Amino acid sequence: MSARIAMTALVAMFAAITLVPLLWMISVSLMQPGEAGQFPPPLVPGDPTLANYRELFASQGMGLFLLNSLLVSTLATMLALVFTLPAGYAFARLRYSGRDATVRALLALLLIPGQIGMLPLFLELKALGLVNSYAGVLVPWLAGIVGIFLVRQYALSIPLDLIEAARIDGASEWRIFRHIVLPIMRPAVATLALFVFLGSWNDFLWPLIVLSDHDLYTLPVALAALGRERAQDIELMMAGSVVTTVPVLILFLALQRQFIGGLLAGSVKG
Amino acid sequence: MNGAASRAERRAGWLFSAPALIAIGLFFVLPTIASLALSLTDFDIYALADIGNLRFVGLANYSALLSDPLFWTALGNTLWFVALGVPLVVVVALFAAILVNERIVAWRPAWRAVFFAPYVTTLVAAAVVWKYLLHARYGLLNHALGTIGLPPVDWLGDPRWAIPAITLFVVWKSFGYSMLIFLAALQTVPRELDEAARIDGAGWWSRLRHVTLPAIAPAAGLVAVLAVIAMFQLFAEPYVMTEGGPAQSTITVLYLMFDQGFQWWNLGIGAAVAVVLFVCILAAALAPALALRIYRGRSA
């Protein structure tokens, strides 16, 4: 029993250290302007206030950036599902010549980080007139190879007999996909949607490159820009960090099981 | 039961995968190949205005890079991040995984979620938070050091401390993901082996050393390779926390690519940096497999 308490206390201590930055972020975001810049640093607000949040939304346009991020992440999620789900299913369960070679080629492509092609991709999108638009921000999310393998991994568990039976009943391939495969793959769909939403919400480098118009900024880009202007306003910056971070933390806490299971399916087994 | 595929099935296979394949080809494969071509040109702001100004320059960009001290600084800094960060990630993630895997620990799913939470946070927002935690005068870390009698450190303002400080943040941000890989590997440790060692009178430490660690060694290798790759891709951390400073001590290879490409519009040079980055990451990813093959070849 005492070993149980001792070990749990050790884990709790480690967990507390891990949580300090996030708790401190929330605490300072509620402090009066200038309060955090003292020594010793205060841990809790003496007189809690929402003034920093009001300033963010009223004068810094945070509402717009929040909407931009929501819009970009929602669109990225929807597009990724449309492009990834049929492909992942086809790579697992449809028989056609060239399939296995394609899958092997995609596996090899996993070794290439997306940043390598960013400069030419920028030139390509410039030629297409997509720079400084959400279409430009969304383009990398269409081509998610990791997502394809996540879906493929899951689709491999669908019994071929089930698909064959539907064919004998005269169902078209599209109908089979729509009415039999998609309902079975619901957990994979949810996991993929969660990944793409979080990924596009947290993305920084590519939106920073593509978006030049301040009004189009997503939260991370806007927050980095604000940090360069208002570095001295710790409390304001913490409020901005809360607005940027808390939505994804809530999403993670609500869908933890899905998230962690999906990560392991994608990285260890796949 | 599994007869030959019908024409409809073959057609559906290509129709279903075509949109994704076209997107991957157009927005991933093509730019990646074009990076190589671009790195052999002098594409800059003048070529951006008029493509007629573009010239093929062969390996001039690469030789320019090799003689540019900033390139060597960026490469050296990145290697410092690797040297400090990779062992730390492995050790911290393994420690966390072993702790939350112990059956006697209460509320294990809750701790697992806590350790994983930093991985989910927005990188830029978390970097902003850490920038203030590491503040020389009123940062929490220096305050904590002060309470145990240590002098304050100018974490992000001193070129000697900026890389360790940012590494600390990176480890905090990412160890949860590696912990999951270790947790999955720990599930595969044969329980009978552990029990047998226990019956033989082996203590906790001895069982960890002789049963658990050997069983999860491959997972440690995977975590290390993924951590090396992640360290080569550091960008937002120095961009937000130090802007590459002080005295260029936190400029990374990817930072240099961004700077050359999108700040100075030297896209040819930027592409050459991208190709170097690619070679580094490929080497990091393939080195373990290669080493293993050589090792096996020798022992055979």
Image (spheres, rainbow, N blue to C red):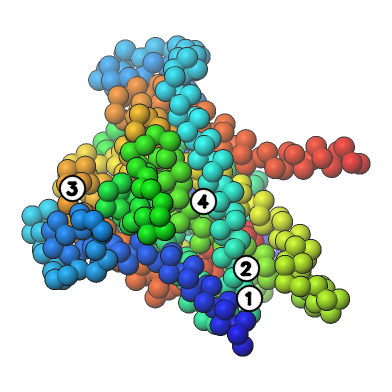
Which disc is residue A145 wearing? 4
- Dots 4 and 2 on the same chain: no
Residue found at the very far right of the displayed protein: B300
- What x and y, as percent, mark residue A160? 66, 70
Q: Amino acid at mark 2?
A: Ile
Determine the chain carrying the residue at label 3.
Answer: A
Q: Which residue is mark 3?
A: A232
Q: Amino acid at mark 1?
A: Glu
Which disc is residue B102 wearing? 1
Pointers 4 and 2 in contact (C-beta within 8 Å): no
Instruction: Please state if A156 lies on the left or on the right of A151 as rendered.
Output: right
The residue that appears at 21% across and 63% down in the rendered structure is A29
Q: Quarter holding the N terminus of chain A?
A: bottom right
Determine the chain carrying the residue at label 1.
Answer: B
Pointers 2 and 1 in contact (C-beta within 8 Å): yes
* A123 in relation to B191, above or below: above
Q: Quarter holding the C terminus of chain A?
A: bottom right
- What x and y, as percent, mark residue B207? 76, 69
Q: Which residue is mark 2?
A: B98
Q: Amino acid at mark 3?
A: Gln
- Dots 1 and 3 on the same chain: no
The residue that appears at 67% across and 57% down in the rendered structure is B219
* Secondary structure found at label 2: helix
Determine the chain carrying the residue at label 2.
Answer: B
Q: Nearer the viewer, mark 3 or mark 4?
A: 3
